Amino acid sequence: MKPNLIELQHSQIARTLVQLSALIHEPEMVCSILAVSPQNIVKGFAWGSHFNALIVHDHHWYLARDIPIELLRSLLPLIEGINRIFFIQQFIQPLGHSSAEEAAQYLVNLQPCLLCKHTWEQLDMMAAPLQGVSCTLAQARV
């Protein structure tokens, strides 16, 4: 069965933050995948950052992409201690030029890491804007 994919449109940090937090806290949530992508890549160096999320519920998938990185920093305290949240340990390719279906499939096919007290700091460090950082993008499993 193909999932019903709903793309969330970012308008304001506060509104999107409430929307994502509510979806992650719902009992229907199967898992969530959080990822950071560079805003721009110039000759292998990343500048700026975007936050991306795929929230999987029993019957719907919710995709949020190319959201300002500040939202991730605001979201982290709200989701602390919630089970079934994963993140991608490497930066991912920017998702803005992909269709919603391609972006969701790309996130599902990346190697995830469980977000827990031992990995929390790693995701927190990724929630800062990039300023000319050399980066290798995560590759999807085929």
Image (cartoon, grey):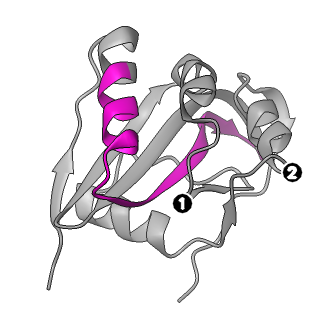
Front one among 45 and 7: 7
- The residue type indicated by label 1 comes to Arg
**From what the image shows, is residue 131 above or below residue 101?**
above
Q: Whole-Å distance between the Cαs marked 2 and 1?
A: 15 Å
Residue 10 shown left or right of residue 17 in the figure? left
Residue of label 2: 118
Magenta stretch contains residue 142 = no
Please state the horizontal and vertical placement of residue 74, each as a whole percent of the image.
57, 18
Q: Which residue is drawn at 53% across and 89% down?
A: 142
Residue of label 1: 84
Q: Is mark 1 on a helix, strand or loop?
A: loop
Q: Give the range drawn in magenta.
A: 18-44
State the image coordinates of residue 39 (x, y, percent, origin top left): 57, 32
Disc 1: CA contacts within 10 A as few (<14), some (14-19) or many (>=20)? some
Query: In the picture, residue 123 is in which quadrant?
Result: top right
78 displayed left or right of 45:
left
Question: Compared with residue 43, is residue 113 higher up or lower down, i.e. above or below?
Answer: below
Q: In this view, does 106 lie above or below 132?
A: below
Q: Position of residue 21 (x, y in %)?
A: 40, 31
Foreground of the two, 43 or 20: 20
Q: Please check the rendered image and state whether residue 34 is part of the magenta-colored stretch, yes or no.
A: yes
Which residue occupies the foreground of this view, 129 or 83? 83
Q: Can residue 133 be seen in this view?
A: yes
Q: Position of residue 22 (x, y in %)?
A: 32, 33
Q: Residue at x 84, y 37 (%)?
A: 121
Give the class, few, some or many, for how many residues have Cα within 10 Å of label 2's Cα (few <14, many ≥20). Answer: few
**Label 2: element kind:** loop
| One can see residue 138 in this view | no
Looking at the rendered image, the quarter that the N terminus falls into is bottom left
Residue 104: mark: none
Answer with mark 2 or mark 1, whichever residue precedes in sequence.
Answer: 1
Residue type at the position of mark 2: His
